[in-house]
Image: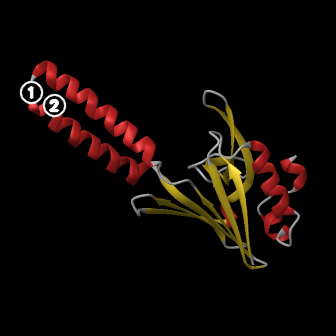
């Protein structure tokens, strides 16, 4: 069974959240991010090249134009390969673990697997980034101290959903037939509220 919902990120961009139920013990979330805007890409490229052309007319050195083209191409390739995420997938398999996959615009994929025994809790964390933003995190148990936390792993790093939308998404998931699966992760409606 598959379910799709639309949300917006903190900047107002459209996000699509797909939920797939493979079995009562296996659930997958896929967050699709908006594609690169051709308008913004063209604006940045033109700005860099016009600034380089302005410097070229002052200095009359053709190396400035060549460097501007080279820097723009390297910057675009670096952005597509390391920064721009097309979609992120969260696969939860009860009693086995959580797999998080990030697919970048260049085709590169990054996968992280967390064993269910290492998961202490799933929380909504807040951070200050010019304003207060909220995001989902997995707290990992500390192997040395049983009540301690060894690491905080953010979920869906590319686009941060608004708090109200995270809350609604978790509440709808916890009230669904997957309540046992979410309970094994420590997510209950009372914790979200």
Element type at marker 2? helix
Q: Element at badge 1?
A: loop
The front one of 123 and 43 is 43
* Image mark for residue 64: 2
Q: Are marks 1 and 2 in contact (CB under 8 Å)?
A: yes
Give neighbour class at mark 2: few <14, some 14-19, many 20+ (Cα, 10 Å): some
Q: Is residue 53 left or right of residue 90?
A: left
Residue at the image position 72 percent from the left and 52 percent from the top: 146
Kindly identify which residue carries mark 1.
61
The residue lying at 30 percent from left, 33 percent from top is: 48
In the image, residue 84 sits, relative to residue 117, either above or below, namely above
Residue under the point 27% across and 30% down:
50
Q: Position of residue 124 (x, y in %)?
A: 74, 45
- Which percent across, then down, holds residue 107? 41, 64
Out of 108 and 141, give the one closest to the viewer: 108
Q: Residue at x 65, y 45 (%)?
A: 9
Instruction: Count the numbered circles shown.
Output: 2
Using the rendered image of the protein, determine whether residue 96 is visible from the camera's viewpoint: yes
Q: CA distance from mark 1 to mark 2?
A: 6 Å
Most distant residue in the bottom direction: 23
Instruction: Name, please, the residue furthest toward the left.
Output: 61
């Amino acid at each position: 069974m598959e379910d799709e919902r639309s949300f917006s990120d903190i900047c107002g961009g459209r996000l699509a959240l797909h939920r797939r139920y493979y079995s009562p013990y296996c659930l997958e979330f896929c967050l699709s991010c908006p594609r690169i805007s051709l308008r913004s890409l063209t604006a940045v490229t033109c700005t860099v090249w016009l600034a380089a052309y302005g410097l070229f007319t002052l200095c009359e050195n053709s190396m400035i134009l060549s460097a501007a083209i080279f820097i723009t191409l390297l910057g675009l390739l670096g952005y597509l390969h390391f920064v721009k995420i097309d979609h992120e997938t969260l696969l939860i398999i009860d009693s086995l673990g959580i797999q998080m996959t990030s697919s970048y615009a260049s085709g590169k994929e990054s996968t992280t697997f967390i064993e269910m025994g290492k998961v202490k809790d799933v929380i909504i964390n807040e951070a200050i980034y010019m304003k207060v933003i909220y995001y989902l995190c997995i707290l990992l148990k500390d192997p040395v101290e049983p009540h301690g936390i060894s690491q905080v792993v953010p979920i869906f790093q590319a686009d941060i959903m608004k708090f109200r939308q995270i809350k609604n998404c978790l509440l709808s998931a916890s009230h669904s037939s997957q309540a046992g699966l979410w309970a094994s992760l420590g997510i209950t409606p009372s914790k979200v509220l």
